[in-house]
Image (cartoon, coloured by chain):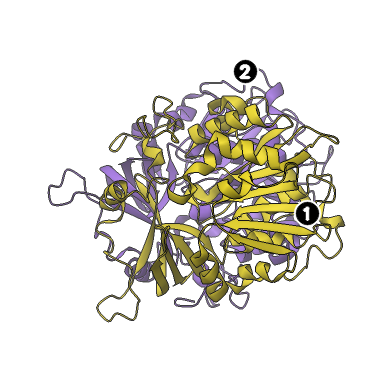
Chain colours: A purple, B yellow
């Protein structure tokens, strides 16, 4: 697709399935493949070259301006001015970088992809957490997969009904870096309800008691490298098993402008596995590709059945939830309902959402 | 603000009013000021330098990749890969450029700011048109201010109740360029209901009969240069005068992530002038700054009073509207209602929207 016009909304190429290495990988998956060295090289030569060669502190006298380029998609990039690189190291799993930007506060980058910025993290963390937790009555046990920055924990803690929060994050360095540079997110780890498990989520879920959780939140990076298995059938099956009847899953699910084929794959798969409701929602997050991020919400069969579109557990009714530790900045019950309204092209391109 | 941390959501600086040249211009207005040569120079030195020096065709053998940088805001930029520059000329009012991008189809740029791309123009054109027109019964006479690309005309034409469409665009070159390079937008000019007036909208409105229009749509560029006066009191007063009782205005109104002070100013002003309802809505448009664009919707006093949140004239009920000339891609009645749901930080920062 490199060099094609990109006209129109449909960016699929012969319906190739991204998660299957045997088939041709559509160009829209290059973002997700950025940790693959070969693709990474292509990506840098097409997206980054000519702008700056590597991340450096702006104290370097030879450079007046340094930008970080987020290679979002072949043919486009979002760039943030770097005031100072605060941290850059390879963990066992990925390259972890933190820099101070001039416009979005501090920025966390994993394998060259922006994960969060201080300015707009509220939208992502609040939506991925409260969309599921406000859709069920009195959530008690919650599992977070990924989420090592702690932001989702911070949000779950607003729900006083919650008694136990398990978090399974594979990369200790992400946790350490967040505690050092992002105290507003890492504050989530301070809550005594939080139980941290550093390790593989697949393995963790395999050993989780059946029906233990009211809600599971998958806050993973893009589905490649450490997160590759987190978009495949066995993973979703193990989540469905770990959820109680009428329990809910919220899973990060890419951009409706860029990755409708990934959304189609994920929604179809989830409809096979989760026998309750399966819905797609989205939110505005400026520093994510195309300025939006999506979520697939699923429920297991059970009583009461879950109606994601009408939050049964509105956050405005929860004691102290709006101000717990820090003010709720993005999410409210109106935004919750609005998040499920889909543009017509999404319904057209994602067959499994046509009836939503 | 250049060099500050940009932490948090509030980017206002001492409440300075952007439209007033006498006061300090907040850095967030640099985008709107990009057509000012002096600010333009600053902008280029901070945002663009080091990436590429000027727009060139990729047929230039010395350059493997050429990108267009949209200077959105100090400290960030959104960049599109240029396949070929198709047009670049100075009109009497502004620099007009068209290029073929690799990922978003053809792109129209005025004074260095992306106005539309083929991939995502549907979101902007459909929302700015149908939000107002679906909020009143049987719109008959409509005025478009700006909108020289024709996209808004294309959308208005879906409404068979409309008998007259006046459009007042100041720059003939924008119209000509659209007719040559953007036939999917310029098709709007072909409708016999359309009456084109090339000239100054302030002047046009001064001579418009009182109460002539059911709806006015202001599809202007950023409020500087030719569009400077389009955010000031006399302009809004002349629109209110030209609208019938219970008529509606929809006005482009920047990004809720970047320009809450501009939104505050515009909403406050409109509340003083329009005695019906004044509301703020937004939509996802990837190639606009921060990935969103906002709209201020206003109605004049009259019966029936306008309730923007519940479209009285749903597009799904209009004969042939969904497929007229080309398929409706973004807008539907659910998206209409959802567009008015505001993130909590917007209500906190924009005092005049707190009760919305």
| Residue A182 rendering spot, x and y as whole percentages | 39, 33
| Residue A109 rendering spot, x and y as whole percentages | 38, 48
Does any portion of residue A211 appear in the rendered image? no
Q: Nearer the viewer, residue B161 or A68?
A: B161
Indicate left or right for B171 with B135 as reference: left
CB within 8 Å, label 2 to label 1: no
Residue sitting at x 65%, y 59% = B152
Quadrant including the N terminus of chain B: top left
Q: Residues within 10 Å of mark 2 (few under 14, many from 20)?
A: some
Q: Is residue B282 above or below residue B182?
A: above
Residue identified by numbered label 1: A356
Residue sitting at x 74%, y 43% = B337
Q: Nearer the viewer, residue A299 or B346?
A: B346
Residue identified by numbered label 2: A320
Quadrant including the C terminus of chain B: top right
Residue sitting at x 42%, y 66% = B97
């Amino acid at each position: 697709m490199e060099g094609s016009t990109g006209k129109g909304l449909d960016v699929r190429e012969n319906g190739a399935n991204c998660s299957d290495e045997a088939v041709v990988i559509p160009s829209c998956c290059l973002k997700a493949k950025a940790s693959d060295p070969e693709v990474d090289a292509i990506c840098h030569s097409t997206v980054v070259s000519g702008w700056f060669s590597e991340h450096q502190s702006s104290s370097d006298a030879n450079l007046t301006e340094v930008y970080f380029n987020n290679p979002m998609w072949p043919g486009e990039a979002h760039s943030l001015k770097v005031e100072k690189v605060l941290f850059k190291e390879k963990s066992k799993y990925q390259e972890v970088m933190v820099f101070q930007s001039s416009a979005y506060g501090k920025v966390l980058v994993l394998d060259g992809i922006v994960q969060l910025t201080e300015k707009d993290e509220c939208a992502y963390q609040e939506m991925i957490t409260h969309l599921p937790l406000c859709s069920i009555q009195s959530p008690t046990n919650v599992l977070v997969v990924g989420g090592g920055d702690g932001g989702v924990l911070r949000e779950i803690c607003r729900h006083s009904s919650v008694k136990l929060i398990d978090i399974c994050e594979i990369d200790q360095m992400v946790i350490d870096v967040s505690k050092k540079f992002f105290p507003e997110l890492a504050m989530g780890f301070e809550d005594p309800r939080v139980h941290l498990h550093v390790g593989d989520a697949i393995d963790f879920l395999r050993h989780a008691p059946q029906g233990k959780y009211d809600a599971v939140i998958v806050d993973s990076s893009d589905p490649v490298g450490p997160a590759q298995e987190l978009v495949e059938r066995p993973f979703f099956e193990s989540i469905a098993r770990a959820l109680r009847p009428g329990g809910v899953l919220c899973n990060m699910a890419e951009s409706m402008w860029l990755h409708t084929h990934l959304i189609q794959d994920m929604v179809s798969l989830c409809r096979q596995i989760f026998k309750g409701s399966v819905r797609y929602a989205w939110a505005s997050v400026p520093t994510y590709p195309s300025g939006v991020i999506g979520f697939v919400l699923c429920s297991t069969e059970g009583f009461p059945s879950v109606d994601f579109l009408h939050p049964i557990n509105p956050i405005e009714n929860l004691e102290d939830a709006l101000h717990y530790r820090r003010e709720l900045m993005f999410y409210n019950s109106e935004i919750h309902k609005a998040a499920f309204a889909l543009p017509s092209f999404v319904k057209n391109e994602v067959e499994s959402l046509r009836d939503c």
